[in-house]
Image (cartoon, rainbow, N blue to C red):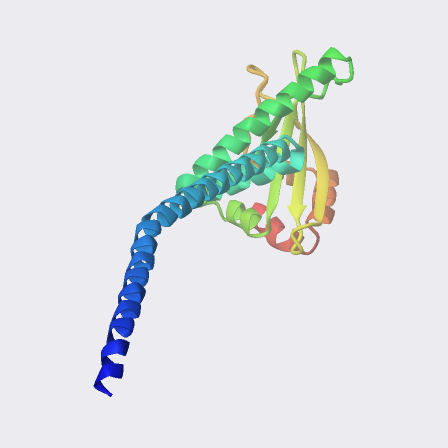
Amino acid sequence: MDRFMFLRDPMRSGCSGRLTSSSASRRQTGVSSIPTDLAALREQKLRELAEVRLQLAAARQRLADAAVEYAATSDGLCETYRRFELASGAERDELRAAYLGGLSLADQEFQRRCALGHARDEDGPLQALPVGSFDDPLGRALIERQIMGWARVGRGAHPAVVVGLMRLLPDQRTRERLRLRDSADPLLGTFTSTLPEVLRRAWADAETRAKVQRFLGTHASVVGGLIT
């Protein structure tokens, strides 16, 4: 029995030694590969993050460009300006940039029409009508009812002014619109009236008042009461 044990012990010892050496080798190989794998993974994630940032920047630029293009339309200009009037901080700066960009695009479009001979005497650069002081009850009523306006000052010694009124309905998609005539400053040929001032002048004329009342719909009695 002792002889058999003597013969078996070296074999077990040798096998054990070889297994231990192999296991140690695998562990050593695994440990050395972990930092390499982590570094490669980190580089991959950094590349992916950089790509996402580029995509986000491009998306933000597309949104900014779309806002400027919309602000170049009559509806978009007065809506953008109203949001600017009510905003604060960084949002106000963004809306100011969109509004000014829209003004520039609208002016370019007007100049092209002039060059092609498609502009009429009462046609002119587009501008938004400010709501004026928030302390004015009429101004606050116009804000609450989402009533906005724009104007175009015509050309010539005594330019006519075309005023557009726009009311955004509760579905936030449908819009009621009305066009009125007004007059520019007789000396400077400019138009600096606020939206409440335009409505008060329009209300003074019976025929124009009837048009404004139809435009206001169910809000006519409230707005009319604040005008008078």
| 93 sits to left or right of 59 | left
| 60 sits to left or right of 13 | right
Q: Establish if 88 lies above or below 31.
A: above
Residue in the foreground of this view, choosing between 180 and 81: 81
Q: Establish if 24 lies above or below 206.
A: below
| 75 sits to left or right of 120 | left
Residue in the foreground of this view, choosing between 110 and 206: 110
Q: Establish if 62 lies above or below 117.
A: below
In the displayed orientation, state which residue is furthest to the front.
3
Percent across and percent down for residue 182 are: 66, 28
Q: Can residue 13 be seen in this view?
A: yes
Percent across and percent down for residue 4 are: 27, 82
Toward which corner of the image does residue 11 lie, by quadrant? bottom left
**How many numbered tags mark residues here?**
0
Percent across and percent down for residue 115 are: 73, 11
Q: Can residue 200 be seen in this view?
A: no
Q: Which residue is found at the position 31% from the left and 69% from the top?
A: 15
Q: Which residue is found at the position 53% from the left and 39% from the top?
A: 55
